[in-house]
């Protein structure tokens, strides 16, 4: 992974018409490279969750506008940002600090913003990297809604939010590069330990609330986000879920073609699923236990 200087690139013509939103929390390592890949944009907003490292200073050195807010849940945090951050333009590209916009994607976004037709959002392809290798086959969901008009977007679910789009969605075959392991395995495990706790809480809350699930929508809904929501609920009902995840990614999606990096990724995803399973069991047992019992 390349290391970029903190100073913004010079003598580059800025492209009007697109704003950028980057969510951060202690991202001094990855943020410079992210910002460098967005040097073509004239309205970059860093939405920071009270970082204690040099994240804010780096953002400001690149000329980005910084908004600070304590993080509560991912969906609430993102929804607040879309409603309250003063974007200059009607089209917003959302990025994480460990991502890089390719020159080809930048051109595609600019072309789409000039002529979006009836579309209010755009699905963008993602390329994940591990051990310096693009995980071409094993990535579970290569498309992400990252380019949109904020007034047509909201996020639901506390963890791994579902993007709800009010209007038609376009697609591009261009991609951004994602480096989820840039901070090392210790950071990955720490982050996913937190994610699995939140995910387990969401699952238990959904079950207690009797959240509706439709097999028909999971299989046939024309809305990709609605279909993904019901597919996720179906997935949570499967027995032996960690093993199912391994088979789906390594065999069905041919993760074995990604070599050692692919196998490593599949094992990590299966471990993450098992963490969720164990925490759901623990949480349900705790809630079912009479008060005062150990």
Image (tube, rainbow, N blue to C red):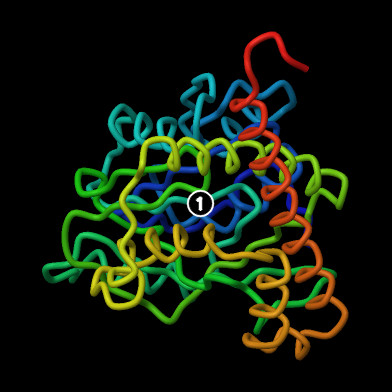
Left or right, 175 with reference to 129? left
Q: Position of residue 293 (x, y in %)?
A: 73, 14
Observer-nearest of 112 and 289: 289
Kindly identify which residue carries mark 1: 95
Badge 1: how crowded within 10 Å, few (<14), some, or many (20+)? many
Residue found 56% across the figure and 49% down from its top: 96
Observer-nearest of 238 and 178: 238
Observer-nearest of 242 and 265: 242
In the image, residue 89 above or below residue 66? below
In the image, residue 103 above or below residue 9? below
Q: Position of residue 5 (x, y in %)?
A: 74, 47
Q: Position of residue 173 (x, y in %)?
A: 43, 82
Quadrant for the C terminus, please.
Answer: top right
Q: Position of residue 220 (x, y in %)?
A: 28, 77
Observer-nearest of 216 and 291: 291
Outermost top residue: 292
Q: Quadrant of residue 211?
A: top left
Give the structural element (helix, strand or loop) at label 1: strand
Residue found 61% across the figure and 47% down from its top: 97
Residue found 33% across the figure and 62% down from its top: 225
Left or right, 42 with reference to 58? left
Please tell me how many numbered marks the rendered image carries. Answer: 1
Quadrant for the N terminus, please.
Answer: bottom right
Left or right, 272 with reference to 200? right
């Amino acid at each position: 992974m390349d290391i970029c200087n903190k100073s913004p690139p010079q003598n580059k013509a800025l492209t009007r018409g697109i704003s950028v939103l980057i969510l951060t929390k202690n991202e001094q390592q990855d943020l410079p490279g992210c910002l460098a890949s967005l040097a073509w944009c004239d309205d970059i907003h860093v939405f920071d969750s009270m970082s204690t490292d040099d994240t804010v200073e780096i953002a400001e050195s690149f000329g980005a506008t910084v908004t600070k807010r304590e993080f509560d849940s991912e969906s609430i945090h993102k929804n607040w940002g879309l409603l309250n951050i003063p974007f200059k333009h009607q089209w917003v590209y959302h990025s994480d600090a460990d991502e890089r916009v390719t020159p080809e994607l930048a051109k595609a976004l600019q072309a789409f913003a000039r002529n979006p037709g009836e579309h209010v959002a755009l699905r963008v392809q993602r390329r994940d990297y591990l051990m310096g290798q693009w995980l071409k086959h094993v990535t579970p969901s290569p498309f992400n809604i990252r380019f949109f008009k904020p007034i047509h977007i909201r996020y639901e679910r506390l963890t791994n939010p579902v993007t709800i789009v009010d209007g038609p969605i376009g697609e591009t075959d261009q991609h951004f590069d994602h480096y989820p392991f840039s901070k090392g395995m210790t950071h990955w495990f720490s982050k996913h330990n937190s994610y699995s706790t939140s995910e387990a809480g969401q699952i238990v809350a959904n079950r207690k609330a009797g959240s509706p699930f439709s097999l028909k929508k999971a299989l046939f809904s024309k809305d990709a986000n609605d279909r993904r929501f019901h597919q996720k609920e179906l997935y949570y009902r499967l027995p032996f879920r960690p093993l199912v995840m391994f088979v789906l990614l390594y065999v069905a999606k041919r993760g074995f073609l990604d070599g050692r990096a692919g196998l490593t990724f599949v094992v990590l995803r299966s471990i993450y699923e098992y963490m969720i399973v164990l925490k759901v069991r623990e949480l349900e047992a705790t809630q079912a236990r009479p008060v005062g019992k150990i």
